[in-house]
Image: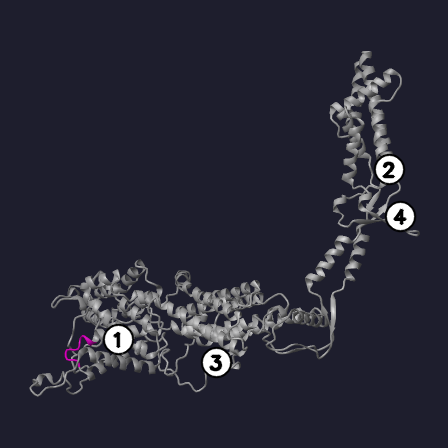
Amino acid sequence: MGIQDRLGLGPKPGRRPRRSGSLKIDTRKTEPDRPRLSRQAVLMRAGLLVALTIVALLAFPRTAVVDGLARVGEPWNDDDVVAPFDFAVRLPEDEVQAKRDSIRQSEPPIFVERPEALETTLGRLDSLDARLDSTFAAYARWRSSRTSGVDSLARRDSLLYRERREGLNLGLTNQQINALISSAFQVQQAGGGFSLDDRLLTEAARLSRELLSEGVLDVEKDSILSAELIIRNLDVTNRTEEVVAKGQVFGRTEARRLARRSLAAAFPSQPDTADIAYEFFRRSLTPNLLYQQDATLRNLEERLRLVEQTRDQVRENTTIIRYGDIVSEEQFDRLRSLQIAQRERTGDRSFVQTVVGRALLVLAALSIFFLYLFLLRRRVFDDIRRLVLITLLLGGVLIGFWIAGLTQLAVAPYAVPVALVSILLAIVFDSRVASFATLTLALLAGLIFGGNFTLAFATVFSGILGVFSVRDVKNRSQLLISAGLVLAAYAVVLFAFALLRATPFESRLVFELLAAAVNATLLFLVWPILAAVERGFGVTTDITLLELSDTNRPLLKELSMRAPGTFNHSLQVANLAEAAAGAVGANALRTRVGAIYHDIGKMLKPEYFIENQQPGENPHDKLKPSMSALVIAAHVKDGLDLGRQNKLPQVVLDFIATHHGTGLMEFFFRRAKELAGEDADQVKEADFRYPGPRPQTNEQAIVMLADSVEAASRSLEKPNPRRLQTLIEAIFEARIADGQLDDSDLTFADLAKIRETFQTILAGIYHFRVKYPDQEPEEEAADGGPELPPQKAGLDVPLPDGAPVSTSPPPEDLGRQPHT
């Protein structure tokens, strides 16, 4: 027993066996047996289901659940809420955040005093002084060796001087370094005094002592938000702390700015000298107040932890809010606090549980829809392009729900164009698929927006009403009626729920109706979206079929001019097929359009087809049977070529390709065997069959039958109801016996209805008159005489395309002769 049988999805027991091929004896309308989907196909469809589920989950509000249920100033539409336990009412998040921000700005940073900073600074100045003295000495030796006349000694001292000079790394220009060296050399030559570098180093040391005595930070003072800071000593055993104002100390940049200003004042007429002194200061100053980030953050976190986040307590069994109450700020805070308290009690499991619960509900809703397609719309389910189209349309609505949730407007979900998608699905597929999809979307809408039953009910009512409004769409202006019906549906539902709230004229209703009006207005996007769908997914809607059914279209005009007989034949076939399709629940419009275009290939060689021939003219008399068969069969290929050139949709091209199936051109086949004489066995039946394929749908099978019956009925010399009945039954039996209906879904009950429809319409066409007293005896047989079998009536049934009318007795096995 397979998995489908275990789940109760297999074929029902008690079905009668089929008679031949795959033609159904069961009178119920069921999907045909289809091959199992491959593993890859199953995974693709599962992927679409998972993708829709993920989009739906993303559409759920990610804020607090309370935010999704109601907002301050709106009515509470859920059950009464009673505190299940004691809990604290939390302050609003913005108030708590404001307190935290205030602490962050007022919390003083912690610095550690570094006593050795002055010693380090002076040591750097001494090191700089030593490097300068070494450079000056190298310069003096180089000058001395250059005047001694010993070149090797001069080169050696020159290299040493260059090395010492480059090793200074003071960031000074060559001109400034030359000034220092020149000053030192002059003092040496004079035999005493203070050189320029001595004076500058002394000034830099003085400034460093003054600034470090006040305190120099190792960070920028502007980065400190508080007005105070804490200074600690390094002695852990005897720690002291001093709180000082931020203005009493210097930041790193501030100290350098003060030094530059002081040095400029010390050397007012020597800016280069002041720059050199500043460079000495900048490179030697060591801040003596070091920022302690870890200690500061620990203090800040402790203070933030102590921030008061609650206001009061709610006792167990206290009623927080009742159904219909207008949510106040206090009630909203209590609801939000209850939610936080419940989350804290369950821990991290709350989020996981919420996501899993939502996912299961969404999967349940979507799976039912996919299961419906699998069981009752298998052609849609098996066509991955159409399934992707449905997924994109449903996904678009779910994205609309997500956007509506982001707006934080309670009326926004009513503007999501669910009705637009419902109408698109009804036009592209059928009303049942559209209605089931609408129910699914309405269920998801209620889930996503916190159990909003008003939204779900309005979505169902408006969407299905929109679907019904386009079940028999005839023109594009009909969408105006659909938009009006959708808006009226929303108005009725919303007003009804407003009455239940006892607030029928509140402002909320006005805004909901405005959102619904936006929803209805979006229906005018149906036509441009349909055009894109038809091009992108290869589907053909009833709107396009209606346009194709206009006989004034250029292709049909050309057919009526070049092959008038074929044109009239096609119209008669269209009338027969349309009526029969309506009788068995098939797509009557699609059937009619397929019948109108099924023989367009005949216009290329109209004279080879009997309905276009004049009496006594038949070019087949001059051709071999095999050549005649090729000419006749070519009208299928020619029709497909013409259809593609004129951009006919694939659904119409399928009618052209299948209207003869793989039927045998009996007339030419028998004639070829007669001419072959003793070599009749060499004549291959396959050479006299149409290329096919056989009809794949009920509509295509109906057109095949209508084409055969209409053409054969013209061969009756004196038609009457009984002769027509005999003719129709013979053609139907021939098609069944030849297996031409095996790939369609027609049941024998369907065939009985089709036969009855054909006979009724043909009886009206041939208009059997009432017999008058003076009527000639020879007319009796034509106007109700005794029934004659087709063999006795002189019928060659069925009549092949292009073959001459024959009154000779047909072969013995009449029932196996298909119409070619």
Mark drawn on residue 234: 4
Q: Amino acid at mark 2?
A: Thr
Mark 3 and mark 1 in contact? Answer it, CB < 8 Å. Answer: no
- With 281 as the anchor, is 465 left or right in this view? left
Please tell me whether mark 2 or mark 1 is closer to you in this view: 2
Can the viewer see residue 813 in this picture?
no
Chain-order first, disc 2 or disc 3:
3
Mark drawn on residue 10: 3
Q: Which residues are magenta?
A: 713-719
User: In the rendered view of the protein, which quadrant contains the C terminus?
Assistant: bottom left
Mark 4 and mark 3 in contact? Answer it, CB < 8 Å. Answer: no
Please tell me whether mark 4 or mark 1 is closer to you in this view: 4
Q: Amino acid at mark 4?
A: Leu
Toward the viewer: 343 or 631? 343
Q: Classify 10 Å Cα crowding around label 3: few (below 14), some (14-19), many (20 and above).
A: few
Please tell me whether mark 2 or mark 3 is closer to you in this view: 2
Task: Please identify the dominant SS of the magenta region.
Answer: loop
CA separation in Å, label 4 and label 1: 106 Å
* Helix, strand or loop at mark 1: helix
Can the viewer see residue 493 in this picture?
yes
